[in-house]
Amino acid sequence: MDRIKITNLYNLNETIAKDLFQKYEYPFEVLPNIEKFIKDYIKTLNIEEYDINGDIAISKSATIHSTAVIAPPAIIGANTEIRPNAFIRGKVIIGENCVIGNSCEFKNSIIFNNAQIPHFNYVGDSIIGFKSHLSAGVITSNLKSDQTNITVKIGNKTLETNSRKIGALIGDRVEVGCNSVLNPGTIIGRNTNIYPLSNVRGYIPADSIYKDKNNIVPKK
């Protein structure tokens, strides 16, 4: 299970939530604690660098379109662009230099610095790593159809998460192709590419190319 530990998926220097991540081994353990972290962290921010309104903090260098909706609690980092009709439903941290696209929806998620999620995406109960990119129409499904707790499987080993809602846990520098669906509890290792129109489930190794569930090849 070492491959899905936080330290093997993320560069923690690329998120303001570093201290939160360092409390846990696995990324799904972070998700229930995002709300409290945001509320506490906002109290430490410099009002000369952030516009703060209750439990919403937006960097003064961020660009927020007038039709975007940002619900508390949320933090938007420096030089990030929030495009028209984006819906940030709360309990969301968006890092620096990110692109959040038109008609995208986010809830209870952490987006690392330099990530791009630019077109018609749903990101719920998920973590998107440094410099990762979700192409148009990528969906992170976060609830099983039978609404039972989500498990993570690697080979013949199963890890219980004790949670009903987990989306995708995407490592650094991952590229996910257009209109792919990432099923609940999907974990994608660093530097991996997912082909467009993919239906992804379980753990996808780092430094690989996912063509379909029976055709996952190492990058050369």
Image (cartoon, grey):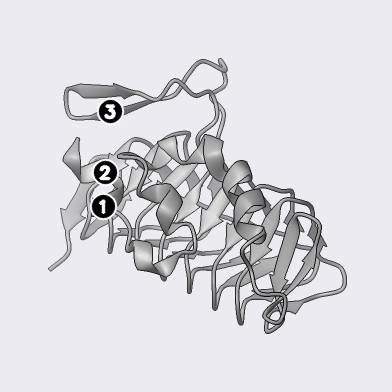
Closest to the camera, between mark 3 and mark 2, is 2
Q: Which residue is mark 1?
A: 7
Residue at coordinates 47% horizontally, 51% vertically from top-left? 127
Dot 3 falls on a residue whose secondary structure is strand
Question: In the picture provided, is 89 more to the left or to the right than 15?
Answer: right
Quarter the N terminus occupies: top left
Mark 1 residue crowding within 10 angstroms, few (<14) / some (14–19) / many (20+): some
Would residue 33 be found to the left or right of residue 19 on screen? Answer: right
Q: Which residue is mark 3?
A: 153
Q: Is residue 117 above or below residue 140?
A: below
Q: Residue furthest right?
A: 66
The answer to whether residue 173 shows anywhere in this view is no
Q: Amino acid at mark 1?
A: Thr
In percent of width and height, residue 123 lies at 59, 49
Q: Is the Cβ of the residue at disc 2 closer than 8 Å to that at disc 1? A: yes
The disc at residue 205 is: none
Q: Residues at badges 1 and 3 in contact (C-beta under 8 Å)?
A: no
Residue that badge 2 annotates: 5
* Residue sitting at x 67%, y 68%: 101
Label 1 element class? helix
Label 3 environment density (alpha carbons within 10 Å; few <14, some 14–19, many ≥20): some
Instruction: Estimate the x, y position of residue 4 in percent, counting from the top left.
Output: 26, 42
Marks 1, 3: nearer the viewer: 1
Image coordinates of residue 71 in percent, x first then y, are: 79, 52
Going 26% across and 52% down the picture, which residue do you hit?
7
Residue kind at label 3, given as amino acid type: Lys
Would you say residue 159 is visible in this rendering? yes
Q: Which quarter of the picture shows residue 64?
A: bottom right
Which mark sits nearer the N-terminus, 1 or 3? Answer: 1
The correct choice, above or below, for 134 with respect to 48 in the image is above
Residue 122 appears at what percent x and percent y? 63, 50
